[in-house]
Image: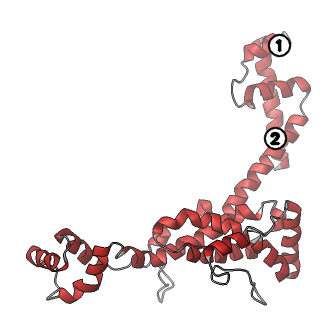
Amino acid sequence: MTGTALTFPTPASLGSLDHYIQAVNRFPLLTAEQETALGRRLVRDDDLSAARELVLSHLRLVVAVSRNYLGYGLPQADLIQEGNVGLMKAVRRFDPERGVRLVSFALHWIKAEIHEYILRNWRLVKVATTKAQRKLFFNLRGMKATTAALTPTEARAIARDLGVKPEEVVEMETRLSGRDVVLDPQPDDNGDSMGPIAWLTDTEDEPMQILERRQTASNRSKGLSTALARLDERSRRIIEARWLREDDPATLQDLATEYGVSAERIRQLEVKAMKTMRSQMGALA
């Protein structure tokens, strides 16, 4: 956001996480009309007060999302802070004219920021989590005679001195000797870069692709409704009974009995109606 920075409560500013959660739950939820009006003010006038209201009304969403990541050993307050960054990015990119609620759009950005934070801290969190691992973490390098890998005899000796299992010594040595992998490397002099992040990217779940799919589905639904409305009553009944029932679609014979004609006549009417609908929906595309 440009201009004056947004100010809103944080766990640190309210003294505890519980107080923060109580505070954000007091902010009222916005109706679709209020959300659209605020979004238009932000887009049209770069109105930071509108952005602030959009952010405040969705802080409880960040709290809810953060609870799904408590198993990674990171403080929930830190997860919330990172999720709030994602929420502000979503508000900055929110387009009120697309007819999509901010909550749906913001979920992607909130999760993306939390995921990035966990990845940045993954090695620090996972190297030493138990008491034995912490003891090894702080003592193993100093107890090794050389930089070479430990022999079974050396591993047993260190384990005996520290009161841990030999396999725990070997495991910690492996962890300490491992190197972090850069998920998103900086481009080289030729402007090229390739890292694991390229393999992890799922372009199908990017916000613009999600919105485009929803818009396409909405357009198809409207086109289908328009095409059905232009059919005569019998043709519309045949298409709905044969193709638009979620379960137990009617057979040609069922409809033939209903209208007192042959099944072949129903098939002909169905083919004609489908051809007419395809033509009309193509014209609307």
Task: Give the residue furthest to the left.
Answer: 153
For marks 1 and 2, give the CA distance: 25 Å
Q: Amino acid at mark 2?
A: Leu
> Could you tell whether 239 is left or right of 111 in the image?
right
What residue is pinned by disc 1?
258
Q: Is residue 242 visible?
A: yes
Query: Where in the figure is residue 260, as x and y percent of width and height?
Result: 84, 9
- Badge 2 marks a residue whose secondary structure is helix
> Could you tell whether 137 is left or right of 200 in the image?
left
The quarter holding residue 38 reads bottom right
Q: Is residue 63 above or below residue 248?
A: below
The quarter holding residue 18 reads bottom right
Residue under the image location 80 percent in, 77 percent down: 51
Q: Amino acid at mark 1?
A: Glu
Q: Nearer the viewer, residue 42 or 233?
A: 42
Query: Where in the figure is residue 77, as x and y percent of width and height?
Result: 58, 76
Label 1 or label 2, whichever comes before in sequence order: 2
